[in-house]
Amino acid sequence: MANRKNTNDKCKEIAKDLEITKEIKKINILFKDLNKDVKKTVDSLIQNAAYMAVTLRELQETLNQNGMITEYQNGENQWGTKKSPEVEIYNTMVKNFISAMKALNDYLPKGNKKNDDDDFDDFVSSK
């Protein structure tokens, strides 16, 4: 039985590593034109952001399956409910993920950012 559990854990670990690698590739596409020295600087941040993205998805699945509230017992007759530990971890990790993504965004070349202006105002004023 222990062997089966170890094998299952290894499979999950490999699957998570593959998901993290996919996430790293997605993020790296944004930085393909970045100077090599700057890229070395952000590599660790990219890896951490990818790890957090995958872990956040896992935590979302867990919260969807188990709910956000868990029951507890203090002593023999004291029962209650509280926020599940996964909620605490999720909330903290979301904040860290947002910070990492903002930091990565600061390294993006400024000329590659999309312009949200659709030139509608220029069109209207030219008529």
Image (spheres, helix red, strand yellow):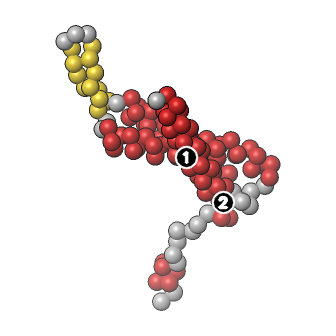
Residue drawn at 26 percent across, 17 percent down: 73
In the picture as drawn, the residue positioned furthest to the top comes out as 75
Q: Quadrant of residue 109?
A: bottom right
Residue drawn at 45 percent across, 43 percent down: 58
2 in relation to 22, above or below: above
Residue drawn at 57 percent across, 68 percent down: 115
Residue 68 coordinates in the image, percent (x, y): 31, 36
Residue closest to the eye, 16 or 12: 12
Residue 6 coordinates in the image, percent (x, y): 53, 32
Report which residue position mark 1 lands on: 15
In the picture as drawn, the residue positioned furthest to the left comes out as 77
Distance (Cα) linking label 1 and label 2? 22 Å
Residue closest to the eye, 82 or 72: 72
Report which residue position mark 2 lands on: 29
Residue 110 coordinates in the image, percent (x, y): 67, 60
Residue 95 coordinates in the image, percent (x, y): 49, 39
How busy is the neighbourhood of tag 1: few (under 14 within 10 Å), some, or many (20 plus)? few
The three-letter amino acid code for the residue at tag 1 is: Ala
